[in-house]
Amino acid sequence: MNNRNRENLQNILRYFPPALIILMLVLFSYFSWNYKLIVDDFQFQIVMKEKSILNAAVFFYDGFNGRMASHIFLCSVFRIFQNKENLFFIYHFIMLSGFVISLAHFLKKYLETFRNNLLTNKKAIYWSAFITSFLFFFFFAGRVELWFWVSATGVYLISFIISLNAFAFALNKNQNAKTIIFSLMLFFLVGGFSESFALMYLLILLSLFIFALKKNSIIKKNIISIGLGILGIVGALLINVLSPGIQNRLGWLPSFRIQQAIINTIHSLAFPILRYKHLPFVIVLIGLFLLYTNGFSRKAVSKITFWKKGLMILLFIIISFFIPSYLLSDVVPDRAASLGYFIGVLFLFDHFLLRNESFPIEK
């Protein structure tokens, strides 16, 4: 490709991120406006007609599962929007905004600590919106499960929002009492939402703790925040596991077999990629590679490093799929598998674009 054609392609690709963000917002607006309550939403709606927020949360804790933090949050949401289903689109946009802002917060701290790259707030929001639109397309077939199913957003999407801020505080380059306390509180809180997600956060924290113990580790001074985060999640998980509700739920879940869980994990990893409804994800992935190969990545690492990191991330993804396969004894739904997808998406962006000194939108 000669320099002129290369320059023309770069000019075209420069508009790819904002175009993707705008398209995502249009689609999000459409689905948000037309969403109707489904499945567990009706159960919360019925219970909230008869009980207070606290009594309803205890009711679910005793009878369904131990996600006390999630129950309090969802009961509050259904109380606020009681008899106002046509206003739930406001809730969806609040959740979307919360995710974008939280991801921007995480990216700023992550890049500052691990890449020695300072992002402005504007650039962090750009990156976050770009990655969010990418993730939205990836879940195009499962959009209801992650982005619009109200009771699912209160379990999984809120788990993302809280954990991103928790990791941002724990990995903050400038550690102090405030960041340590905030990270501890948030990790304890996030343990009260999705159990499978909490187990993955715990695994990531344990990996970071081991890395922080190394002599020349760049996060050595973060070891207190990371260690307390581990204790916070373990404490919340114990409250969850020891609840009467989780025992009741285990009683009606199918019996578990290790072979079936492995098979379901393989199906869960392969099936979403093969669905035609995920074609937009493939298109966006191609666009990401084009951005990389046409001059937007100035600090690419070697292939050996890429594959070593890639295999490690793949292992995390497989584990994140296996845990819900174990807990559900079934093929993992998109909402429960979304953490694995999210880790994969962040890895792609980290390797191909986040290393850059400039964001593709900006000249």
Image (tube, helix red, strand yellow):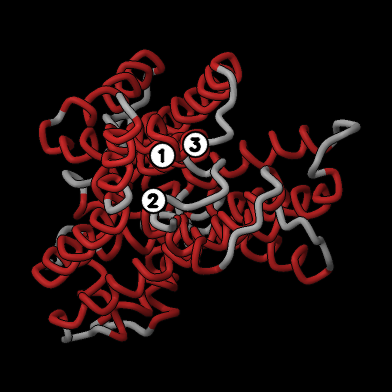
**Which residue occupies 29% across, 45% down?**
13
Residue 88 vertical position relative to residue 322 in the rendered view, above or below: below
Q: Give the mark, 1 or 2, whose residue is nearer the N terminus.
A: 2
**Which residue occupies 52% across, 28% down?**
313
Q: Is mark 1 on a helix, strand or loop?
A: helix
**Whole-percent x, y for residue 58 in the image:** 44, 70
Q: Give the mark, 3 or 2, whose residue is nearer the N terminus.
A: 2
Q: Do the residues labelled 1 and 3 touch (CB within 8 Å)?
A: no
Q: Is residue 239 visible?
A: yes
Q: Are marks 1 and 2 in contact (CB under 8 Å)?
A: yes
Q: Can residue 42 be seen in this view?
A: no
Q: Report how far apart the C-alphas of labels 1 and 3 lie in the structure.
A: 17 Å
Residue 109 vertical position relative to residue 354 in the rendered view, above or below: below
Apparent side of residue 160 relative to residue 186 in the rendered image (left or right) = left
**Which residue occupies 58% across, 34% down?**
299
Q: Is mark 3 on a helix, strand or loop?
A: loop
Check the picture and name the quadrant holding the N terminus: top left
Instruction: Choose between 320 and 251: the one closer to the eye.
Output: 320
Q: Quadrant of residue 202?
A: top right
Nearer to us: label 3 or label 2: 3
Q: Which amino acid does label 3 sit on?
A: Ser
Which disc is residue 345 wearing? 1
**Which residue occupies 44% across, 49% down?**
246
Q: Quadrant of residue 149?
A: bottom left
Pointer 2 local density, CA inside 10 Å: few below 14, some 14–19, many at least 20: many
Q: Give the mark, 1 or 3, whose residue is nearer the N terminus.
A: 3
Q: Quadrant of residue 338?
A: top left
Which disc is residue 297 wearing? 3
Q: Find disc 2 in the rendering and name its residue.
A: 131
